Image (cartoon, grey):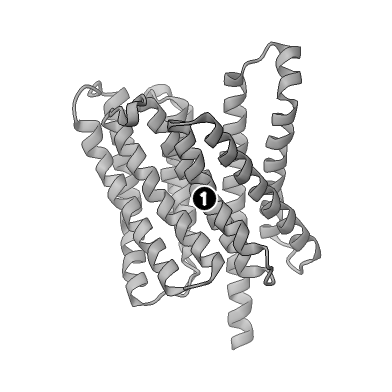
Amino acid sequence: MKPSIVPTILGGIIAILIFCLETFQLNLVEKFLMYAAFVIVPLVILLLSYDEQNKQQKMIYAAIKLLQLPAALLALASVMANKTWGLGSTAVPGNLSLGWLLFTLLLGIYGLTVIVNHKGRAGEIAIGAGLIYFFIGGIWFSLYQYQLDLFQVKHTTHALSSAHFHFSSAIVPIFIGMLGRIMTKKSWYPWVVAIDIIGPLLIAVGIIFSKPIEYIGVTLFACNIAIYTTYLLAYLKKGSLRNKSTFFLVLSCIAFYTIVVISMCYPLLKNMFSLTIHDFIPVYGLLHAFGFVLCGLIGWVYMIGSLKEKKLAYGT
């Protein structure tokens, strides 16, 4: 029985409404957080459905599938209570955000089981770490909704940290872990996984405490994504898969390289058109969230699904 894509489709419809309708009165970061809750996480859950799960994992996974939509709706209610319903001065937004926090805790627990059950396998450690990073994103989201100024940093920075852990920090390790499942063994791959796990933490620490640390983390993380996309494109070029997975994974890689080119051209474009970094943030966000992350997840769902079907066919 094939995994259901209904939660992803329903979440996509809700996400489109959130982005298009002014009724919700959310800022851009909050819209991307809701997009992660309603679209990105269901795709990750769909990707995990192809894992070989033990009894414990099946129980946790069943709870994750059941609770994803209610938790996402609670997250939406949380930000709407803060912005739309005028309850920002109360504890209501924070209390509602706890539903999403507990759900991401389930994702983190599932990630721990992946790591524990596949000791020493770098790719599985990367996937497990990515799922744990969702939980860290959930913590930052609750801190933001409670409007707490943790570490002497304004609570608005917590929203950026939450978005960071819901997108790059969680998704890139999962992508690199999926790459590890299909690639031939390489001596450099464990180093890529290690840097990929450390990089998001450096970025998060840098955002709060130190810009130099943030720059180091961003540089390491960007280099890791460059290695991932380069190897993936080479694999797709010589591979036998010529289907939807190839199309979406190539789009994902192109989106990343587009971000790199725009970043390199930023000083020139800034002077030519009198632009600021705030003018580029929506462009970066759209390319990353809808290009690199969304297309990449869709591509990996098709890729792992196709490989699973071939494996079952050969097995029979």
Q: Mark 1 points at which residue?
A: 198
The quadrant where residue 228 appears: bottom right
- Please indicate, yes or no, whether residue 169 appears anywhere in the rendered image: yes
Q: Residue 182, image x and y in percent?
A: 65, 69
Q: Residue 249, image x and y in percent?
A: 67, 53
Q: Residue 83, image x and y in percent?
A: 32, 23
Q: Looking at the image, which residue is at 61% across and 51% down? A: 296
Q: Depth check: 43 or 116 in front? A: 116
Q: Residue 314, image x and y in percent?
A: 64, 85
Q: Looking at the image, which residue is at 43% across and 32% down? A: 208
Q: Quadrant where the C terminus lies?
A: bottom right
User: Please, what is the three-letter code of the amino acid marked with disc 1?
Assistant: Ile
291 shown above or below 211 = below
Q: Looking at the image, which residue is at 71% across and 58% down? A: 232
User: Disc 1 on helix, strand or loop?
Assistant: helix
Horizontal arrangement in the rendering, residue 177 relative to residue 34 (left or right): right
2 shown above or below 101 = below
How many numbered marks have been drawn onto this rendered protein structure? 1
The quadrant where residue 279 appears: top right
165 shown above or below 269 = below
Horizontal arrangement in the rendering, residue 290 relative to residue 65 (left or right): right
Horizontal arrangement in the rendering, residue 102 relative to residue 130 (left or right): left
